[in-house]
Image (cartoon, coloured by chain):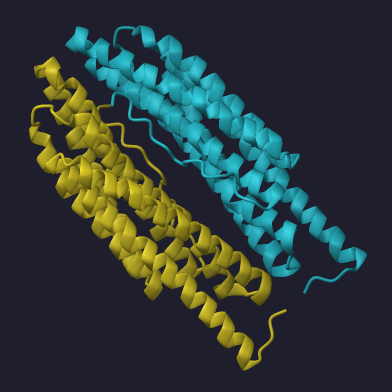
Chain colours: A cyan, B yellow
Amino acid sequence: MATTTGHTIKAFDQDLNQLRANIAEMGGLAEAAIADSMRALVRRDPDAARIVIENDAKLDALEVEVERLAVQIIALRAPMADDLREVVAALKIAGLVERIGDYAKNIAKRVHAIEGSSELRPLSLLPEMARITGEMVHMVLDAFVQRDSKKAVEVCERDRAVDDFYNSLFRTLLTFMMEDPQNITAATHLLFVAKNLERIGDHATNVAEMVYFAATGTHLGERERGEDPVGLS
Amino acid sequence: MATTTGHTIKAFDQDLNQLRANIAEMGGLAEAAIADSMRALVRRDPDAARIVIENDAKLDALEVEVERLAVQIIALRAPMADDLREVVAALKIAGLVERIGDYAKNIAKRVHAIEGSSELRPLSLLPEMARITGEMVHMVLDAFVQRDSKKAVEVCERDRAVDDFYNSLFRTLLTFMMEDPQNITAATHLLFVAKNLERIGDHATNVAEMVYFAATGTHLGERERGEDPVGLS
């Protein structure tokens, strides 16, 4: 299959660059979706939320395209070792970034649900949490394109701040509910928004682990994946 | 790479059977984790919960093994068309089943948090919801092993019942919180348990879509994936 002629190597590199470009584009869309959904939530702007929800289809289409291209590369170019590892990582990373987009879409879907409810102070903490997760998505895609394992480790480390934010918001929102039952519906929706952001952080961390594996060929220690901070324990 | 000698074909089939066996084993572990975590929650049994949490490491190890084997198959056997599609599907399905295990683990982690709180009636609806999602996981892994696209479609259809359960529980738990602020902490944890089950249903549906694709080579229509029923809207 794989030959060492210049022609085949060049075609492989072109395919791989296309794969990387598609994933970088997915990362950009996911990052924008996080920021846009949070802006829609803070402004209680259902029109802006609808745009986030509609735009998610682009991420879904790009994931399908990455899968098609990755399978084509494996089938036609028969990549070995490092190259194969990168193609497999790309396939899985595309799935994770698509799900990050789903979480942003889910945040946008809550805008309608909290419309008309009185303002809750913890809402001001959520945009900061969204900013950090957006940065994690940006960083981890940079790390992927640059095959930078050190940057991947940094992304994993930032996830601790996201978990701390989540736990703090969990406690705060619960006290709001206890103070006034009228806050319960809105606070519950904001709790799920915080949870979505916490999951985005987890997924960015999972991507970071794959970038690390693709770049180094070894797994990133015994870190717990997909952890779900329980909040009050 | 791939030759048509009996030797190579036999080795490929053996590898593929091993891959299927590993994924079937993952499915069995995930199904057990769902049932065991729910039993631990209903009985408020922290020891049973701890066993679920500890057992999750087996699923993580199996996922790593599936990934290693899939990459080895692609690299050494260079499968084409249907076979390649199945290997790629196996790789992605292993990731989804591992996450289903994470959701069950997250349910088990809530056992400690609700310990000592007074009993809430909606708790009786959760085991039924867990039973349906466990069945979906069982069915979809059967569909994978049997390459049964019809059964995969059935799994997708069952997910609607899970979403209905979730929406009903969401409303019920919110009214419990409003009736008595003392219910808020426990009800919030149960809300996340319901959400974890709803996500398990989504993931089983995603597996079903991949089984359908692996079996037929076409995608399962325009179904929305990873949908997040918002509850009150």
Name the residue located 61 percent from the left edge and 93 percent from the top edge: B6
Q: How many marks?
A: 0
Residue B102 visible, this orientation:
yes
- State the residue at coordinates (12%, 35%): B122
Q: Position of residue A84 (x, y in %)?
A: 70, 60
Picture quarter with the C terminus of chain B: top left
Residue A8 is left or right of residue B196, and the answer is right
- Residue at position x 35%, y 61% in the image: B27
Residue A192: give x, y in percent of width and height.
Answer: 35, 27
Q: Nearer the viewer, residue A54 or B152?
A: B152
Q: Outermost residue, bottom direction?
A: B6
Q: Is residue A29 above or below residue B201?
A: above
> In x, y percent, where is residue B183?
14, 22
**Which image quarter is the N terminus of chain B in?**
bottom right
Towards the viewer: A158 or A24? A158
Residue at point 17% right, 42% down? B45
Residue B153 visible in rendering: no
Residue B175 falls in which quadrant of the image? top left
Q: Position of residue B59 (x, y in %)?
A: 41, 56
**Considering depth in this image, is B143 or A206 the residue closer to the camera?**
A206
On screen, residue B172 versus residue A232, left or right, reads left
